[in-house]
Amino acid sequence: MTDSSPDFDSTSNTDGIDAWSDTASIIPGPSLSHPPLDINILKTYYTTFIGLSNALGARQALPPELALYICQLAGFEQWGTKHAPEGYDIYAHDSEVQSITWFQFGPFTKRTRNLVKSVQLVTMSKHQGWVSDRGAGSWSWFELQLARPTNEDSDIDRAEVKLRANQDKASWRSHSHPVDRETAAQQGRFAEHRGTVFDSDHELWEEVKEGDVLQVVAKARFGGWANTASDGMLIIGTWWEPSVEMMDLLRNGHTNT
């Protein structure tokens, strides 16, 4: 049995913003709220783990490692968040992609690599508020990319984007700002946008190595397109593990019913 999952905010270095574009600026705006903690789900997790770990009648107690493995097979997971330090404002003027590396999670340790099972980017953001050609798609979007720090401090502006075996960048689109008539008309205001859930079976995790960082990149392309965000966070799903402190409380009968 191990301690509870790592403190995500303390495992990442997001002191700087790497402004690849000279048209990026920092702006205030509405913020996102943390996902609520469901106490009942946690109670179920602990009750199940304790039931598997203790003998009952003719059934022998399972070793903690096997009990935890069964919990993982059952999909027991919990979530942490990594918040962006600041918002930004970025504009495109032509066909050249304008982008900034906004914030990052990591570097991954061997423990966090094995513990993390999914990640999802959520942004409080908008595009320019109007779209002239909806058929051309959205050119205001976010990506997640893997990078390798080039210094011990894992500075966000001193990391090299990793390449996959085919020499493409290890980068995947999270989500774009909508361009459909109904939604795009509301894009003059900030709105919450949820990106793809990169679950444990996504190819991203095949590329993650110890020491890598996972970066959030904001992009815009073609004249008139903008990508503006006041807040962002990575929702990081981890395989659930019981904490030593909580197990001690449960054994001593100090928890509330």
Image (tube, grey):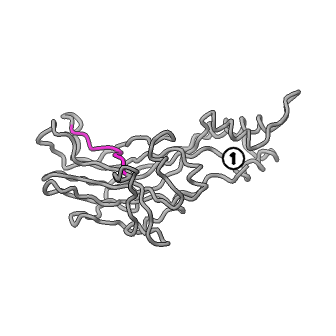
Residue type pointed to by label 1: Pro
User: What residue range appears in magenta?
Assistant: 171-179
Left/right placement of residue 178 relative to residue 50 reads: left
Left/right placement of residue 101 relative to residue 155 reads: left
Give residue 6's position: percent from left, percent from top: 60, 56
Q: Is residue 172 magenta?
A: yes
Q: Is residue 40 visible?
A: no
Quarter of the figure that contains the C terminus: top right
Against 81, is 53 above or below? above
Residue at point 79%, 41% (across, down): 63
Residue at point 15%, 36% (across, down): 135
Against 52, is 233 above or below? below
Give residue 180's position: percent from left, percent from top: 21, 35
Type of secondary structure dominating the magenta stretch: strand
Q: Quadrant of residue 191?
A: top left
Left/right placement of residue 164 relative to residue 225 reads: right
Q: Is residue 110 visible?
A: yes
Estimate how packed mark 1 is, as few (under 14), some (14 to 19) or many (20 or more) residues with alpha carbons within 10 Å.
Answer: some
Which is nearer the eye, 72 or 202?
202
Give residue 83's position: percent from left, percent from top: 44, 56
Residue bearing mark 1: 242
> Mark 1: which secondary structure?
loop
Give residue 132's position: percent from left, percent from top: 11, 42
